[in-house]
Image: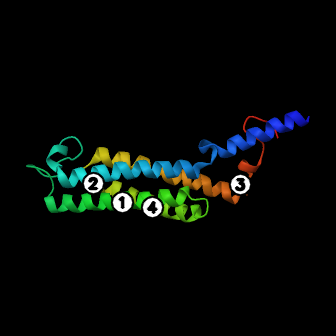
Amino acid sequence: MDEEESKTEKRREAISKSLLFKGPTVVAALVCFVAFVFSDAVGLAIVLAPNLLQGTFLVALAPGGLPAQGFLDLVGVFMVLLGMMYVVSGVLLWSEVYWIKGVFAGIVVSVVGMVASGLATTFAPGVAATGMIVNVLIVTLLATETWEATRGMKLREGPVMGESP
């Protein structure tokens, strides 16, 4: 029986060290980092080369072309700043000390991103849909982590995955 308990303990240690089993918070942090890349890339493209995006990402609102360049610049800068806020959320979520602040920041940033995606459906439907999916994923993961925390983290303290209690 001691050998079996030793194997179980080794498996628990291996799982606790594994990045994949750190919980939804780490996955949400990774999604935040992906959202940063997406948001900043789209924001910079909108500011630097909106004509190249016409017809693929950007849809003309009126006959004759894209929205005014000033509006596109404002949207691009907003996207870059939103991307930076995703990085802050991801870093906080990754921290074992500040993860709860990361949950709050991640939810706030995702709500802002969802509102922006909703507003962007008129001139950038593809980007808006992608942004909405990413933000819903972040909020879902953070809600799952918060739910686990309120249950006393029983899932992490319980039996090893695949074992009966």
Residue at the image position 57 percent from the left and 59 percent from the top: 95
Query: Label 1 to label 4, Cα distance in Å?
Result: 10 Å
Query: Label 1 to label 3, Cα distance in Å?
Result: 31 Å
- Label 2 residue SS: helix
* Residue 41 image position (x, y, % from top left): 30, 49
Dividing the picture into quarters, in which one does residue 126 lie?
top left
Label 2 or label 1, whichever comes before in sequence order:
2
In the image, residue 53 above or below residue 139: above
Label 1 or label 4, whichever comes before in sequence order:
1
The quarter of the rendered structure image containing the N terminus is top right
Q: Nearer the viewer, residue 156 or 109?
A: 156
Q: Report the residue that reaches farthest toward the left.
A: 64
Label 4 or label 2, whichever comes before in sequence order:
2
Q: Report the residue that reaches farthest toward the right.
A: 1
Mark linked to residue 88: 4
> Which residue in the structure is indicated by mark 2?
43
| Count of marks placed on residues | 4
> Which residue in the structure is indicated by mark 3?
153
Q: Report the colour scheme.
A: rainbow
